[in-house]
Amino acid sequence: GPTLAIELHEVLAPLAPHLAGAGRESVLLQGARIALADGPYCAAERQVLTTVGSALGIPAEETARLLAEAARTPS
């Protein structure tokens, strides 16, 4: 919900300037791999991962691409 989104932004947004693009993507992809461990993303997992991408300064289209790529890649 909105509270979780605010909390994620408060934690992740300060990190974003200190991470190169690849580092921000790595944080998002680690979350994606955890979410995928028990099967395809559920709606709540996708929402949280989208919020994580936003908090890290990753454009929405790029976040969607990375999440789709992670879902296609065997772990």
Image (spheres, rainbow, N blue to C red):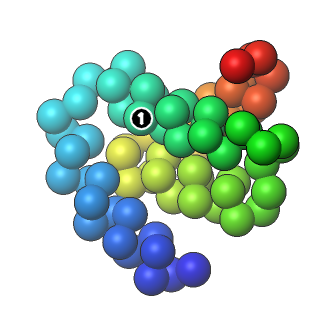
Residue depicted at x 80% and y 22%: 72
Q: Position of residue 7 (x, y in %)?
A: 35, 72
Residue depicted at x 67% and y 57%: 45
Horizontal side of residue 59 vs 12, given as left or right: right
Residue depicted at x 77% and y 30%: 71
Q: Is residue 59 visible?
A: no
66 and 32: which one is in front?
A: 32
Quarter of the picture holding the C terminus: top right
Q: Position of residue 59 (x, y in %)?
A: 50, 41
Residue 37, placed above or below residue 11: above
Quarter of the picture holding the N terminus: bottom right
In this figure, which residue is indicated by the disc labeled 1? 27
Horizontal side of residue 1 vs 52, given as left or right: right
- Say which quarter of the image contains residue 73: top right
From this viewpoint, which residue is outermost toward the front? Answer: 38
Residue depicted at x 27% and y 60%: 11
15 and 38: which one is in front?
A: 38
Q: Total of numbered circles in the picture?
A: 1
Residue 25, placed above or below residue 52: above
Q: Is residue 12 visible?
A: yes
Q: Amino acid at mark 1?
A: Val
Name the element at disc 1. Answer: helix
Q: Position of residue 47 (x, y in %)?
A: 65, 61
Q: Position of residue 23 (x, y in %)?
A: 33, 25
68 and 58: which one is in front?
A: 68
Which class describes the residues within 10 Å of circle 1: few (<14), some (14-19), or many (20+)? some
